[in-house]
Image (tube, rainbow, N blue to C red):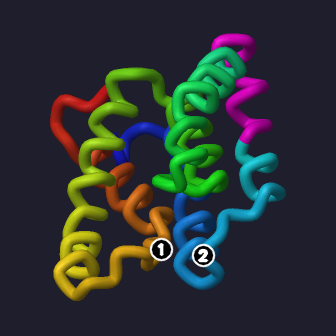
Amino acid sequence: MLFTDPASLPILIFLHIAAFTDARMHRIPNLLTLAALFPGGFVLGAHYLYRLLGLCLILFPLFHLRLLGAGDIKLLSVVFAWCGVDRFLLFFFFSLIAASIPSLVLFLRGSRRAAIPMGPFFLFGWICSSAYPFAS
């Protein structure tokens, strides 16, 4: 839960910083992603690294097709490694629902090549998944 789980505080701080930098610069710095790796690596160990690398490999085709940026994939991988499958699916669902609204507006205006910074939508997805009553 958002306000009762102190273990989610590092990822919440990371998502706030990533959302801000992505909204302003349209990129998520590698240094920020690298800094987000350390708390989970020390706390969760090898499972954290397996999840991180696994999702990077699964999402790489989306980067190759230019559907997601490299920073978005690294951010998603860190969140997945931190929270696991169940929470990640809920987080990703809320993030995509939130991002679909401005995407639809841009599509209807004819701006098919406009890039949308996904960081703020990932933060929104995390907050919604944290507030969801059945999230663990």
Vertical arrangement, residue 135 with respect to residue 48, above or below: below
The residue lying at 33 percent from left, 23 percent from top is 86
Of the 4 image quadrants, the one containing the N terminus is: top left
Part of the protein shown in magenta: 37-47
Graded by Cα atoms within 10 Å as few (under 14), some (14 to 19) or many (20 or more), the crowding at tag 2 reads some
Between marks 1 and 2 in the image, the one whose residue lies nearer the viewer: 1
The residue lying at 65 percent from left, 52 percent from top is 70
The residue lying at 75 percent from left, 58 percent from top is 32
Residue 89 in the figure: left or right of residue 26: left
Q: Which amino acid, by three-letter code, is at mark 1?
A: Ala
Vertical arrangement, residue 124 with respect to residue 33, above or below: below
Query: Residue 59 location in percent, x, y?
Result: 53, 35
- Whichever of callouts 1 and 2 sits on the residue coming sooner in the sequence is 2
Tag 1–tag 2 contact (CB < 8 Å): yes
Q: Which residue is mark 1?
A: 115
Please name whichever residue, 124 or 114, is drawn nearer the observer in this view of the structure.
114
Residue 43 painted magenta: yes
Query: Residue 81 location in percent, x, y?
Result: 58, 28
Query: Residue 94 location in percent, x, y?
Result: 25, 50
Residue 68 in the figure: left or right of residue 44: left
Query: Residue 124 location in percent, x, y?
Result: 34, 61
Classified by dominant secondary structure, the portion drawn in magenta counts as: helix
Secondary element at tag 2 = loop
Secondary element at tag 1 = loop
Q: Which residue is mark 2?
A: 26
Question: Within the image, what quadrant is residue 47 found in?
Answer: top right
Question: Within the image, what quadrant is residue 24 found in?
Answer: bottom right
Which residue ends up furthest to the top in the rendered image? 46
Please name whichever residue, 134 or 93, is drawn nearer the observer in this view of the structure.
93
Question: Within the image, what quadrant is residue 46 found in?
Answer: top right
